[in-house]
Image (cartoon, rainbow, N blue to C red):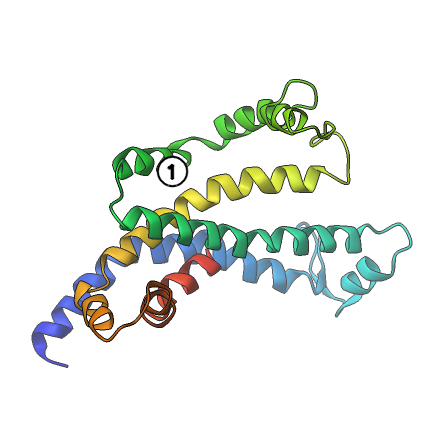
Amino acid sequence: MTKRTFRHTLVGYAFLLPNIAGFVLFTLGPILFSLGISFFDWNLFSSPVFIDTAHYQTLVSSANSHFWDYFGNSLFFLLVVPVQMAIALMTAYLLNENLKGSVLFKVIFFLPVVVSVVSTAIIWEYVLDTENGLLNGIIAALGGSKIPWLYDSSWIKTGISLMVVWQGSAFGTIIYYAALQGIPDQLYEVATIDGASKWRQFWNITLPLLAPTHFFLGIT
């Protein structure tokens, strides 16, 4: 590594330092601390007593425990991640094609990122309302029956997932769009000359070069 490259690397890490420090102090640190004290019986006022995995055994084996229900809910919402990423990638890919009116669509698709969580919740409360909600209005217009999105335990996870996908996909669209802008046009030009179709270019050029972005969005 040359001296200039080393200096640029240090500058890069200096810019990353505030985020890294915030992550270690407010995310990674508390997670590791919580994991550590889960093996102790400790009420913060007495000395901690090591009890091995007793808490976990109680959690899983208790007759009144809702652990498996909560675990199932977590797995359900975990499926939201690939859906978010797929929608974000598709949207960013279309926006990157510079189609007519793409500037307007960029504003529309990026809007959920700047809307606060409280505002988002209020908006979707109206969208998912059983009687007068926009979504049920569309379903009724198509001849379907109204769905109690927010009042039925079998539907509420789906309703919340729709809101999460809407907001999360907007963030993913921004990241994917920035990554697509960084892919050299020459790669596509060469592939076109070689006779590669749009789908082949997407599969063999776009997706592999977006691997770091897939990883980042999957983690965050």
Viewed as shown, does residue 55 lie left or right of 208? right
Query: In the picture shown, does residue 166 fall above or below 179?
Result: above
Q: Residue 218: x and y, percent?
A: 47, 60
Which residue reaches farthest top?
132
Along the viewing direction, whichever of 32 and 114 lies nearer the viewer: 114
Name the residue: 10% across, 80% down: 2
Rendered residue at 84%/51% (across/down) = 65
Q: Helix, strand or loop at disc 1?
A: helix
Measured as percent of width and height from the top left, residue 159 is found at 64, 37
Q: Residue furthest left?
A: 4
Q: Looking at the image, which residue sits at the far bottom?
A: 1
Q: Which residue is mark 1?
A: 109
Please give left or right for residue 19 compared with residue 2 in the image.
Answer: right
Query: To which quarter of the image does residue 190 belong?
Result: bottom left
Q: Is residue 168 above or below residue 47?
A: above
Q: Amino acid at mark 1?
A: Phe
| Image vertical order of residue 105 relative to residue 42, above or below | above
**Quarter occupied by the N terminus:** bottom left
Q: In terms of depth relative to the viewer, which is nearer, 157 or 35?
A: 157
Q: Residues within 10 Å of mark 1 (few under 14, many from 20)?
A: many
Residue 140 falls left or right of residue 59: left
- In the image, is residue 101 above or below residue 61? above
Rendering coords of residue 184 (x, y %):
19, 65
Name the residue furthest front: 195
Q: How many marks?
A: 1
